[in-house]
Image (cartoon, rainbow, N blue to C red):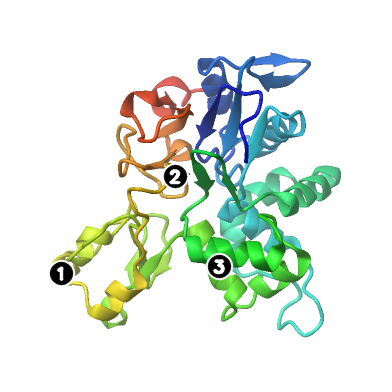
Amino acid sequence: MKASQYTGYDIIGDVHGCAISLRILLNRLGYTQRQGVYQHPSRQAIFVGDIIDRGPHIREALHLVRDMVDAGHAQIVMGNHEYNYICYTTPAPSGFAQPYLRKHTPRNYRILEATLEQLANYPDDQRDFLHWFEQMPVFLEFDYFRVVHACWHQELIDRFVSMNEGNRMRRGFLFRSAVGDSQEHDIMDILLRGTHLELPNKEIMISKDGFERSFFRTKFWLRDPYYLNDVVFQPDPLPAHLTKLPLTREQRSELICYRDDNKPLFIGHYWCQGEPEPLAPNVACLDYSAVKFGKLVAYRMDEETRIQKDKFVWVDVAREVANND
């Protein structure tokens, strides 16, 4: 994307229905409501996806963000939760083993439960937001930075563009992406959920959310990691007896490296904690667990080639919002 009338961009992390936190953050960034839409006189907001699920004010957050996007004051990329919603609510074509693209299992319902319940009495919103999700770009590339929800994998980005003739999913691609062993599924899984490795010896770990996992998410910007613990990138630690296992040759072959000479990259998704800071000189995660009373985080991007710690801006949800959100 070429430069526009905007002098800079404010890239905002996973909202997850925290609309009150989002209003505070936008005000802090200098956005004001005019005719009901948040806008800045010289900057544009970019959302990294995951506006829905988990939080208390999902419908309000959706209207707020979509109004900004429709008016040209914001852009957005698809998060894995928007993708989940599309697949969960889209009827499957003939030949599928289930009536919807995503099975309506207790686990899948639990992930989307808050969104389904909060939109249940608003059929027009259900239809309109589903259509909006379907039209969302999966990634954005500007002259001097990039945005994707979980992982920038250049080979898969190129393949996505070739298969869809752009950065938005076509209908056929969506249907094929719901098939677990398809190329389309693998592309969406990595771009929206990140790279991962299977736990050794078929072990299972229980996440803080109570989900069983046989894999762990991995860092994708390290040049020469050695131990399993070097590459783990998720809020749940590895079981202690696995942390110092050396990476095998096969495991190393599954890792990728977003090199430090690439454009600055902004992602969400990973439930970071603590005070926001760069993951690497050119990689920043903006998901700091807002819906779990962490921080709703933005980065004020201008034309720098390296991410600067003092350009993160955030709302401390536990301290500033917990009594109202």
Q: Is residue 79 above or below residue 243?
A: above
- Asked whether the viewer can see residue 291, the reply is yes
Mark 2 or 3: in front is 2
For label 3, the SS is helix
Residue 87: name its quadrant: bottom right
Question: Between residues 171 and 21, which one lies in front from this camera angle?
Answer: 171
Q: Is residue 80 above or below residue 118?
A: below
Q: Where does residue 44 sit, x and y in percent of width and height? A: 61, 27
Q: Where does residue 294 sit, x and y in percent of width and height? A: 40, 34
The residue depicted at 56 percent of the width and 81 percent of the height is: 181
Q: What is the distance, in whole Å, between disc 2 and disc 1 at their CAs?
A: 33 Å
For label 2, the SS is strand
Q: Which kind of residue does numbered mark 3 sit on?
A: Ile
Residue at the disc numbered 1: 241
For label 1, the SS is helix
The residue depicted at 29 percent of the width and 80 percent of the height is: 250
